[in-house]
Image (cartoon, coloured by chain):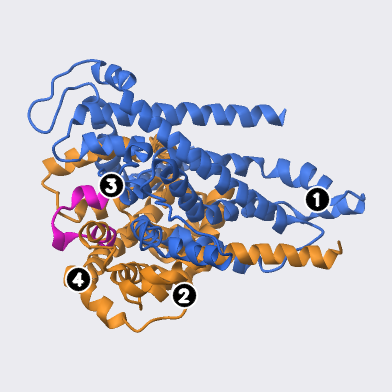
Chain colours: A blue, B orange
């Protein structure tokens, strides 16, 4: 009896070492992750502007968010850019996944194509923004020069398009660049799902004489559904927080600014742009965006699970 | 249509897509060697002769290598601290049963789902209060608490580090931290490398947070410097120089990718499969 107790107390003593191992994480986590999130929540109920005293004003900031025309415009811009982006990005990734998982064609070179398709995702958004706004410049940009030369080849006249400065084209252009940056990432994730499926399933199906479309529809698709959901949700969370590209490519003086200002840019304006700082209001925008992301993710999970039944 | 022809068409489409991924980079390198006048008058893949000129114009505005050096100062310690402390935490969570273990793990799962914008304002306020504006501390130290990395490494330890190995070390009288360093670390180092490289790229490319925390030119990391450069350079007239700037900013990360692409691909795959 006493022997067991002794052993147990020794084990507890060992287990207490766990505290020492997680202590640095817990301390930094509390200070730099938990506190800021709670602090933002608190501030969203106050009237804090730049400096000075914060007064509790209840839900006023949230009422203001809900009734603010520009918040809704920003949300609409975000959703519009994101929709074009996600259709292109996931559509392309899905098609590529179909091509490379096809049992009949057995395409080679996956490892090379994967690397090349992923390349754009490595580059800092600032560099991508800089590169594309120079390439797409209205008068001097290489892209318009190229189109001009192609048109000339066919004897036609090309009127240069101001891709980023024009309200009609700015959003879609940014969405295309965003897709260019991210489709490789989505493709790798989907492919990881396909490669995780046991080869036995495919072989058994082939022996049973199942066609390639049956195999794709009945084996591949259902088995990668969880990963498709993961990809969809991570792109949703990332997409609704879109900031870098539109912020860097379109400056407030440009005519198209109003059509590409995202929620994050709107938050940045009130959170950090000198002259317009209203910390309390910006905090409420942050939480409003969070609630939107949360409810859409939950909805997405629900939809995915229903289809399975 | 025959099987071979169809397959050939598929390959051509795949190659066109690959070319689309590479084209902007190719143009960037070609245009970095051409003068502004050349770039705005014609399109070509043949490099020009104005590299030196562009270089002089660019460095007349900014010393990009300063920004690169600053980025190294931030990204390297953040990556190393992140990898080491995440491994330490993951080991603690996986190998010891103590009160609060589940609570911490739950908090980790929760914070993996919380979008970063939620903490941005509070984080900035905290830094102001602690007089950490213009310091690299807020860009480095938080790497110690990276929920995603801890989660990944914890799963890795549970699946690849046998508890009997740790017990054997205990019987031999090895101190706990020594066991972690000598037995656990070598086993989980491949996973640490995977997460570390992704962490490095993330830190290197990070824009929003450094932009908020840093406001002195000489402190700017590369992405912040690039954004400032874009605002100050007359891009229309100095197109060659702007392409050169982008090229210089992109090269270090391309080099990292050349050496570690295998790890990077596997970490993205792991991220998806863990679900």
Q: Are marks 2 and 3 in contact (CB under 8 Å)?
A: no
Compare residues B103 and A288 and report the one nearer the observer: A288
Q: Identify the element where label 3 is drawn.
A: loop
The residue that mark 1 highlights is A201
Q: Identify the element where label 4 is drawn.
A: loop
Compare residues A116 and A255 and report the one nearer the observer: A255
Q: Quadrant location of residue A29?
A: top left
The residue that mark 4 highlights is B63
Seen at 51% across and 31% down, the residue is A297
Q: What count of labels does the image hold?
A: 4
Chain for numbered disc 2 = B
Chain for numbered disc 4 = B
Seen at 13% across and 56% down, the residue is B216
Residue B10 on the magenta span: no
The residue that mark 3 highlights is A251
User: Which label sits in the foreground, 3 or 4?
Assistant: 3
Q: Identify the element where label 2 is drawn.
A: loop
Q: Identify the element where label 1 is drawn.
A: helix
The residue that mark 2 highlights is B44
Residue A245, horizontal then vertical, whole percent? 37, 49
Q: Is residue B252 visible?
A: no
């Amino acid at each position: 009896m006493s022997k067991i107790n002794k052993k147990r107390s020794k084990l507890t003593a060992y287990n207490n070492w766990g505290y020492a191992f997680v202590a640095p994480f817990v301390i930094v986590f509390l200070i730099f992750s938990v506190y800021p999130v709670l602090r933002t929540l608190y501030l969203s109920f106050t009237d804090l502007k730049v400096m000075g005293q914060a007064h509790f004003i209840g839900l006023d900031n949230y009422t203001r968010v809900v009734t603010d025309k520009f918040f809704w415009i920003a949300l609409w811009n975000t959703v519009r850019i994101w929709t074009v982006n996600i259709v292109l990005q996931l559509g392309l990734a899905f098609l590529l996944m179909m091509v490379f998982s096809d049992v009949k064609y057995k395409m080679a070179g996956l490892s090379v194509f994967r690397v090349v398709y992923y390349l754009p995702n490595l580059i800092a958004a600032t560099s991508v923004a800089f590169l594309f706004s120079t390439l797409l410049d209205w008068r001097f940009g290489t892209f318009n020069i190229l189109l001009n030369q192609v048109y000339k080849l066919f004897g036609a006249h090309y009127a240069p398009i101001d891709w980023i400065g024009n309200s009609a084209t700015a959003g879609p252009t940014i969405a295309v660049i965003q897709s260019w940056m991210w489709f490789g990432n989505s493709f790798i994730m989907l492919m990881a799902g396909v490669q995780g499926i046991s080869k036995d399933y495919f072989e058994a199906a082939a022996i049973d004489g199942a066609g390639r479309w049956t195999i794709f529809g009945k084996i591949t698709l259902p088995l990668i559904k969880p990963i498709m959901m993961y990809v969809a949700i991570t792109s949703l969370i990332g997409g609704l927080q879109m900031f870098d590209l539109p912020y860097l490519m379109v400056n407030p003086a440009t005519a198209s600014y109003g059509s590409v200002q995202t929620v994050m840019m709107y938050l940045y304006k009130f959170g950090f742009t000198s002259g317009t700082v209203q910390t309390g209001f910006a905090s409420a925008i942050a939480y409003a965006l969070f609630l939107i992301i949360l409810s859409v993710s939950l909805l997405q999970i629900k939809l995915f699970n229903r289809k399975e039944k | 249509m025959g099987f071979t022809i169809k397959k050939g068409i598929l390959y051509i489409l795949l190659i066109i897509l690959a070319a689309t991924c590479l084209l902007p980079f190719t143009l960037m390198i070609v245009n970095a060697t051409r003068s502004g006048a050349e770039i705005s008058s014609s399109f070509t893949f043949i490099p020009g002769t104005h590299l030196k000129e562009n270089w002089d114009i660019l460095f007349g505005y900014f010393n990009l290598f300063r920004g690169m050096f600053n980025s190294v100062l931030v990204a390297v310690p953040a990556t190393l601290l992140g990898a080491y402390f995440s491994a330490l935490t993951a080991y603690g969570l996986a190998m010891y049963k103590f009160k609060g273990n589940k609570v911490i793990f739950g908090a980790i799962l929760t914070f993996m789902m919380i979008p970063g914008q939620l903490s941005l304002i509070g984080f900035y306020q905290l830094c102001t209060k602690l007089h950490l504006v213009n310091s690299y501390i807020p860009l480095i130290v938080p790497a110690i608490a990276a929920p995603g990395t801890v989660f990944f490494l914890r799963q890795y330890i549970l699946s690849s580090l046998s508890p009997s190995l740790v017990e054997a070390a205990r019987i031999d009288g090895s101190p706990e931290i020594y066991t972690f360093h000598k037995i656990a670390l070598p086993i989980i180092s491949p996973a640490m490398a995977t997460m570390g490289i992704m962490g490095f790229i993330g830190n290197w490319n990070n824009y929003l947070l450094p932009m908020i925390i840093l406001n002195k030119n000489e402190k700017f990391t590369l992405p912040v410097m690039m954004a400032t450069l874009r605002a100050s350079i007359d891009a229309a007239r100095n197109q060659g120089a702007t392409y050169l700037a982008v090229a210089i900013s992109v090269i270090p990360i391309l080099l990292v990718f050349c050496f570690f692409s295998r790890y990077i691909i596997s970490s993205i795959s792991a991220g998806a499969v863990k679900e």
